[in-house]
Amino acid sequence: MRLYAVADIHGRLDRMAAIKNNLEMYCPNVLIAAGDITHFTRTLPIISKLADLSLPVLALRGNTDLKRIESQFALKENIFFLNNRDVTLQGVHFAGANGTIPVPFRSRIAFRETFIWKRLMPLMTHRTVLVAHPPPWGCQDRVAGKYHCGCKSLERFIRACQPALLICGHIHEDAGMSCLGKTLIVNCAMGSFCEGAIIDIQNGRITAEILKVKGRS
């Protein structure tokens, strides 16, 4: 299975155009939208564009996504809302949770940590693809190149469960890949240098590539 993972679209039509171009170029089986799909207002244009895509979209809310987008997702046949739920597509198991860390950035939603992890724990296996908006503490979470701003409870959860892969975003300037134990962390936040990530899963083996903005090295 080939995944195209993005986060932090923030309602921008130029980022949707980049997504469509990459869908045509890389032909993934699934699009993962790991939060901050919209930017507080005017949610329908972006959600409609996602609904027009000819592949399944697994989505969850980030800190700039109002709760009302959940009911808008529910009206679209190809969009599956992943919060505190799991789904298996082509033999690959996905699970996810809404939310973001409460600091240092102001958020409209934040992880209700103990509650969320208790609900997610039974869904986890070592082959699970976990989707969350923030990165875990210490992995692809640096702001200004030096300050860690990841989620500490997510870091503890991943160490305990060791899913195969975490797809996240939120920290735009630290898009990239690293490992936390046996878990591959992919921060696919769209921004000045990144258009998301292509991830291939075959026979339990995961390979990933961060897609650079055209003309940027």
Image (cartoon, rainbow, N blue to C red):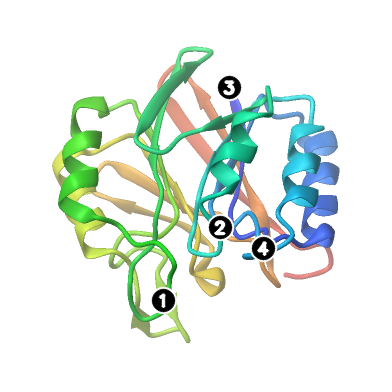
Residue at image point 22% right, 35% down = 119
Residue 155 versus residue 208 in the image, above or below: below
69 relative to 139 in the view: left or right: right
Eye-nearest disc, 4 or 2: 2
The amino acid marked with disc number 4 is His
Residue at image point 20% right, 58% down = 153
Residue at image point 38% right, 85% down = 146
Eye-nearest disc, 4 or 1: 4
Residue at the disc numbered 1: 142
The N terminus: image quadrant: top right
Could you say whether the residue bearing mark 2 is in a helix, strand or loop?
loop
The amino acid marked with disc number 2 is Asp
Q: Earlier in the sequence, mark 4 or mark 1?
A: 4
Residue at the disc numbered 4: 10
What's the CA distance linking mark 3 and mark 2? 28 Å
Residue 64 versus residue 49 in the image, above or below: below
Q: Earlier in the sequence, mark 1 or mark 2?
A: 2
Residue at the disc numbered 2: 65
Could you say whether the residue bearing mark 1 is in a helix, strand or loop?
strand
